[in-house]
Amino acid sequence: MNDDLKIKFWGVRGSYPTPGANTLKVGGNTACVEIQAGSKTIILDAGTGMISLGRELARRAALEKRGIEALLLFSHLHHDHLQGFPFFVPAYLPNARLHIFGPGNSNEALKNVLEHNQSAEIFPVSLRDMASTKQIQTVQETQTIVWDEAGPRAVGANVRLSAEAVAIRIHKSYAHPGCVFVYRLTWRGKTVVYATDTEGYVGTDRKLAAFARDADVLIHDAQYSAEHYYGARAGFPATQGFGHSTPEMAGEVAASAEVGQLILFHHDPNYSDAMVAEQEDYAKKIFADSCAAREGLEIELNTIPDPLTVKIGRMAVQYAKHD
Ligand SMILES: [Zn+2]
Ligand SMILES: [Zn+2]
């Protein structure tokens, strides 16, 4: 059993993919983050970064002669968070099981968007024709997504968890057009918060800061420089109200929430490697432990088993059996 909670960035851009000589260091693919909690694979968003991740998951599974099981969480369904899915190799494999959760106004909303994204007018292969087994479910912010011995599922907020369970809480943010889900994933006492596509508020987004409190890693939108955001950067329109943050806004949330480290995410597609490096410098002035995400960046959080947590976990399982 691997004791690390591993985070790997496969796509770190916002809006649209941006290949080219100026983005080689940071990478040009849109949003996709892989989290490995022991043997469990959790994927945050399905931007074009997901295409390389899919090949890697298929390679690992073939090497170990096993099927694929993965939990895919959508922050929201804007196309930069969706466009990699039709090219995700595991979705075509009969031995793959995909559990797909995300926001929506009705139970069928998420499924409808995914089906529409692969309707005959738009894409040659329909969702139904992809050979994997897919569980697609709209979830609400009052629910917690749990992955334990019984498999991934959405449950009520006050469920008792076993020590090995991955638990993902949801914060519905209104700081992005059409709303966005922020996810807080915890496994063995280590916590990652994924807050992409969110715009800061004057005086800090306090609800988000409370939701992210004490997280080991906060992944936060930082698409625009402050100059760009306010319309003072030549050649770039003002972007206030677009639903994205500056590095200063991200730094304020990180400082207020007292997180372990801040990873700037969802970089503007027009920004060169040098401009993304500047974003990192701006964030560091507010929150020292800041770093700009780049493709291939890996973070490993060691989950040294805490005897107290393990004990509480076992008791919780026993109680659950008597309920
Ligand atoms: Zn986006
Ligand atoms: Zn968006």
Image (spheres, rainbow, N blue to C red):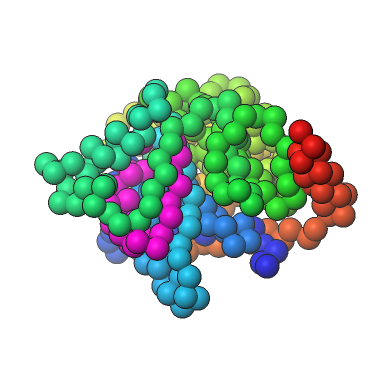
Left or right: 35 as drawn, with respect to 244: right
| Residue 224, above or below 140 | below
State the residue in front, 33 or 107.
107
Q: Is residue 90 magenta?
A: yes
| Residue 181, above or below 97 | above
State the residue in front, 77 or 58.
58
Residue 42 placement (x, y as % from top left): 52, 52
Visible in this render: residue 313? yes
The answer to which image quadrant residue 35 occupies is bottom right
Which range is magenta? 77-102
Left or right: 22 as drawn, with respect to 252: left
Kindly give the residue lying farthest to the front in the view shown. Answer: 322
Q: Residue at x 63, y 61 (%)?
A: 38
Q: Residue at x 62, y 29 (%)?
A: 156
Q: Is residue 303 magenta?
A: no
Left or right: 172 as drawn, with respect to 80: right
Q: Residue at x 70, y 53 (%)?
A: 164
Left or right: 30 as drawn, with respect to 148: left
